[in-house]
Image (cartoon, coloured by chain):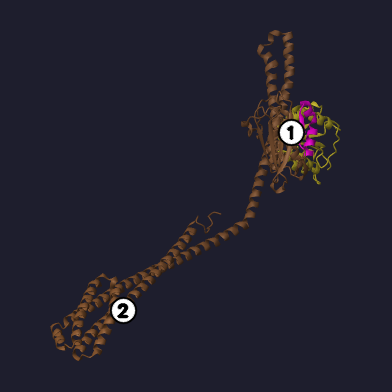
Chain colours: A brown, B yellow
Amino acid sequence: MQEGSPKPSADNPIGRILIAAMVTGFIALIMAAIAAGYAIRQTNRHGDWVVHTYQVESVLTEVRRLAEQKETARRGYMLAGTPAFLASFDQAHDQLIPRLADLKRLTADNPAQAIPMRAVERRLAELDAAQRATNTLVQDGLGAEALRHFRADSGLQRMQKLRVMFNRMGHEERRLLRLRDGEQTASRRLFSAVVGVAGLLLVLVAVVSFLTVRRYTRDLTRSRAELADLNATLEEQVKERTSDLALANEEIQRFAYIVSHDLRSPLVNVMGFTAELSAATQPLAALIDRAEAEAPQIVTEEARLAAREDLPEAIGFIRTSTAKMDRLINAILKLSREGRRVLAPEMIALDQLAEQITDSIRHVIDDRGVTVTIARPMPVVVSDRIALEQILSNLIENATKYRHPTRPAEVHVSAEETRGRVIVAVRDNGRGIDPRDHQRIFDLFRRSGQQDQPGEGIGLAHVRALAYRLGGTISVESQLGEGATFFLSLPATLSIESA
Amino acid sequence: MNDHRSVGIVMIEDDEGHARLIEKNIRRAGILNDIRHYTDGTSALDYLFNAPDGPAKNGPALVLLDLNLPDMSGTDILAKIKAEASPLKRTPVVVLTTTDDKVEIQRCYDLGCNVYITKPVNYENFAQAIRQLGLFLSVIQVPEVEG
């Protein structure tokens, strides 16, 4: 595919966008949750404070009422002297004491209330003392004396001051409530803002995710369509290219055939006229011989050299060169013919084939004094018999050819099957091949080591060409002086399409 | 041959050197018949069918034919000579060429060639083959041309 297919992973922009969107969404949700929790706690606390303020106010009112009741009862007792007023006084006092304690406890949270509170307590205590003094006088029947006391110190001022204190305390609580109201409003605003921001973020995340997913889906659909297209045309493309290759291959084969073929024609002339030349030198040499015998003075040194040495030498070189060229051309021709031959795969037992090959070159093997061993059993392959025979016979023949000067020559042929391929190994203990030449020896007309054996450097080139045709490969492992092992790797079953 | 003077040899061979070597070796075999040499198919066909002194109009002949010619394939000439309506259909044709391709050899015999010889690349063999061909030519009977 020309462009990378989009995948929802962290490796590409779309995956990253989706992950970022998800993270942002979660953060927004967590923010909203925290804000909501905070707001609820604030509201609860505020509710508590409102209740507290009303409690303070109610206790304050109660204290005030009881203080007023006490004063009213004292005055009534002074006027009428009936004990009912005295009872009312005592009752108000008994109720006032716990209320005052309540008030003190409730306002303890606010240091600003502590001063008026202390003042209230002091005033109430003073008032109580004055009231109890007049009450005792009235009880003892000294009503006039009590009235005189009352006139001197009516407690009116104290009462008024007490009222001012109570009002101040009430105002203070109101002020606190207003303050807390403000706090509550602020926190509610904050909550609204946070929830609003979170909501916006969520909307944004939703939009981004939706767009990304839509783009991703669109990309996916498009690449799926492309893939389907490719799949549909793949087979066609493969066929097209295979036929192109086959054409190119055919072209090369034809080229090799034509070249080698057309090179033969002029070679016939060169060889033919060289032979004519050679034949023509004989009467010339004879003439020189006769002239030398009959009239030595007409034979120059130059003429004698030309007829007896230069011409035969030149002709000799031309002949060996043309003979060599002829062999080379024949080699190319043979290779090109091999390439054109149609392969016919069949079941071949490798051990039988190896046996058959060693038998067919038995005379060579015996002449060279080589021991050839064949490992058994060997796998069975499905391949072209003629090609395989040529490969193995070349390899075995080579193995017997390049012996080590001091060791008795041994050649071992073995084969094994691994994962659908058969590897045939031809091992010798001969003179070995320099690792620098391991590639070269498979090239046409290239040889390695001392050139003391006949050959044109064709065999291994032929072997490689054949191995390739059979879908195989050929390689060598060797060190100089330590023998060589050639490995032929073949598909266990040759499929004719690959040939 | 029945009459050394009357049976002409027509050699169609684009390589001058080959032609010369063939002629020399035929002569060495003792064949003295007239040898006419053509280096291309067109003029050879013209001589074979149209020339007043050519085989079609005037007497028997034997054709030595090379398959690789500059202007046409030797097999085309062979097909024309051996065609059903050809006056030369019984004229012996010896294909003498470098090609030793099996398919090509089969094709030539299918078209009616009488002898197919591959030019040996080794000159000694070549010379010997041509001399043997000469000996063969000296005993071969060539039919009269009809019409």
Whether label 1 touches label 2, CB < 8 Å: no
- The disc labelled 2 sits on which kind of residue? Tyr
Q: Nearer the viewer, mark 1 or mark 2?
A: 2
Quarter of the image where one finds residue A332: top right
Q: What chain letter is assigned to the residue under label 1?
A: A
Compared with A141, A245 (above or below) is: above
Which residue is found at the position 80% from the left and 30% from the top? A362
- Residue with the most extreme front position: A140
| Picture quadrant where residue A70 is located | bottom left
Instruction: Pick the residue in front: B33 or A469.
Output: A469
State which tag comes first along the sequence, 1 or 2: 2
Q: How many C-alpha atoms fall within 10 Å of the one at disc 2: few (<14), some, or many (≥20)?
A: some
Q: Which part of the image, by quadrant, shows the N terminus of chain A?
A: bottom right
- The residue drawn where x is 69% and y is 11% is A299
Residue A194 belongs to the span the image colors magenta: no
Q: Work out whether A262 lies above or below A61.
A: above
Q: Tell me the SS state at disc 1.
A: strand
Q: Is residue A460 visible?
A: yes
**Helix, strand or loop at mark 2:** helix
Q: Nearer the viewer, residue A322 or A475?
A: A475
Residue A370 is covered by the magenta coloring: yes
The residue wearing badge 1 is: A412
Q: Amino acid at mark 1?
A: His
| Numbered tag placed on residue A54 in the rendering | 2
Do we see residue B12 in this rendering?
no
Magenta residues? Answer: A351-375
Quadrant including the C terminus of chain A: top right
State the separation of the CA atoms marked 1 and 2: 114 Å
Q: In the rendering, at what x and y percent does residue B87 appear?
A: 81, 43
